[in-house]
Amino acid sequence: MSKEFETQKVEDCFDGSSIFEYKVYKEIKEEFIIKLNIFGKLYYYKEFPRPFFKIKIQNGSEILGVQGECSFRVVYCKKCKEIYKDFFENDLEIILNDIKK
């Protein structure tokens, strides 16, 4: 099974968190944003000129992006990056495959 996304480490923050950019192979639409809310509390600002979304995850990580773009970022907290990154990427693959159907 081929991956539905590419990932690239963007930077490390002073607080020890890590930022990764996820490039998906199609424009981010509302359906995708809504499905991402399985990870945490969704803040979705549809009324913005460039609709912005943020998902605050209970472990302190965040997912950030703009509807209409082909990428988004995840800020992983220092203490959970190794475990949560794999978990997130597995579920992301499932979400993207589900949307393709």
Image (tube, rainbow, N blue to C red):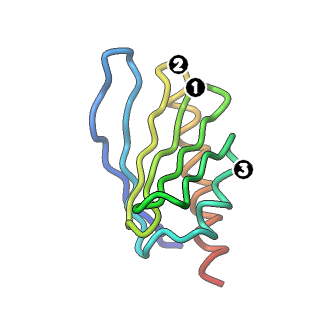
Q: Which mark is residue 38?
A: 3
Q: CA distance from mark 1 to mark 2?
A: 9 Å
Query: Which residue appears at 59% of the width and 68% of the height?
Result: 30
Give SS at disc 3: helix
Give SS at disc 1: loop
Badge 2 is on which residue? Answer: 79
Mark toward the viewer: 2 or 3: 3
Instruction: Name which of mark 1 and mark 2 comes first in the sequence.
Output: 1
- Mark 3, residues whose alpha carbon is within 10 Å: few (<14), some, or many (≥20)? few
Q: Please state which amino acid type lies under the numbered disc 3.
A: Ile
Badge 1 is on which residue? Answer: 60
Q: Which mark is residue 18?
A: none
Q: Please state which amino acid type lies under the numbered disc 2.
A: Lys
Image-quadrant location for residue 19? top left
Task: Give left or right: position of 42 versus 50.
Answer: right
Q: CA distance from mark 1 to mark 3?
A: 15 Å
Task: Give left or right: position of 78 versus 16.
Answer: right
Instruction: Measuring from the top left, give residue 60's x and y in whole percent.
Output: 58, 25
Q: Quadrant of the C terminus?
A: bottom right
Please determine whether, in this image, residue 25 is positioned above or below residue 73.
below
Number of numbered markers: 3
Residue, far right = 38
